Image (spheres, grey):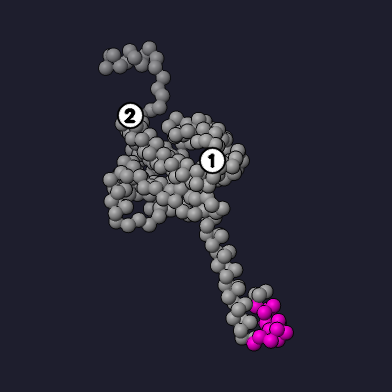
Amino acid sequence: MRYLSVAIAAAPRFGYPAQVSMAWARLRLAGTLLAFTLVVTSTAVTHARPSLDSARLARLAAYDVLAFTDPFAGGLERGKAIGVFDATPEEVFRVASDYAKWKDYLPRVRGSRVISYTPSHALVEMVADLPWPAGRSEVWARYTEEKLPGQIYRIRFDMVRGSMKKYLGSIYIEPWSPGKAALTYQLVAEPGIFAPDSLVNRSVRRTAIGFVNALRQRINDLHRSGWLHPLEAPERRRPLSAPITPDSVKAKLVR
């Protein structure tokens, strides 16, 4: 509105008709609003699976991991990877949100420790050996967990402190077919030292693909070993630890 007021007031002074100045001012105002919208849109992280055509849906059904990038801000790109899992959304969520175990199977993650935890939030400390020139990096990240209608789970994360400039993204888990789930992982990351944007963007894309592949392999391994079952069937769950005593061994032998 400031542009409109200035243009109308200045029209007689410079000899322009008020209608022309008003039209010009409206164009300026529209351009300003459009620029603001583009900035907000480019820096916001969407937390859902992108729309896919039939060819890409067929690739997902064949267990391909699809990778995408889109502009974020300042030359950085948001890396995305999508994969289908032979597990329910609830099972995938339980494994994905077990942050303390990430160091056991995620590529380049050397340490993962839960600092604090509530039913919907977790503060996690992570250490990773990133590709040159970033090297060893440490972050404390806040993970926000949500269960949405339709058996959809969403985890959003952002950096609280650490040696990186940026670390944020999301994990979106949704039903794919009976007994299967689709997971979309999104990541924006920027190391704490200078690195060419092209190098950073390639690394983020590879990291997104590696997360989906590693998590899927972890879930497959847990299924094969009998350690992962739906919570709806507690009688099938294998106890994590059972004390062994001479009496219990003797009882098994007698039976």
Q: Residue at x 39, y 48 (%)?
A: 67
Decide which of 88, 170 is in the foreground and name it: 170
Residue 138, given in percent of the width and then of the height, sits at 57, 35
Residue at the spot of label 2: 225
Name the quadrant of the N terminus.
bottom right
Q: Secondary structure at mark 2?
A: helix
Left/right of residue 59 with respect to residue 121 in the rendered view: left
Q: Residue at x 43, y 32 (%)?
A: 105
Q: Residue at x 60, y 78 (%)?
A: 24
Left/right of residue 225 with respect to residue 147 in the rendered view: left
Vertical placement of residue 118 versus 1, above or below: above
Q: What range of the chain is rendered magenta?
A: 4-17
> In terms of image quadrants, where is residue 225?
top left
Left/right of residue 90 with respect to residue 113 in the rendered view: left
Residue 129, given in percent of the width and then of the height, sits at 51, 33
Amino acid type shown at disc 1: Ala
Q: If you read the primary sequence from the N terminus, does the residue marked by circle 2 or circle 1 appear first?
A: 1
Magenta part, dominant SS:
helix
Q: Examine the structure image and report whether residue 47 is included in the region drawn in magenta.
A: no
Residue 98, given in percent of the width and then of the height, sits at 46, 36
Residue 229, given in percent of the width and then of the height, sits at 34, 36
Q: Is residue 204 visible?
A: no
Q: Residue at x 69, y 86 (%)?
A: 15
Q: Is residue 72 visible?
A: yes
Name the quadrant of the C terminus.
top left
Vertical placement of residue 159 versus 228, above or below: below
Residue at the spot of label 1: 122
- The Cα–Cα distance between marks 2 and 1, rounded to whole angstroms, is 28 Å
Amino acid type shown at disc 2: Ser
Vertical placement of residue 117 versus 39, above or below: above
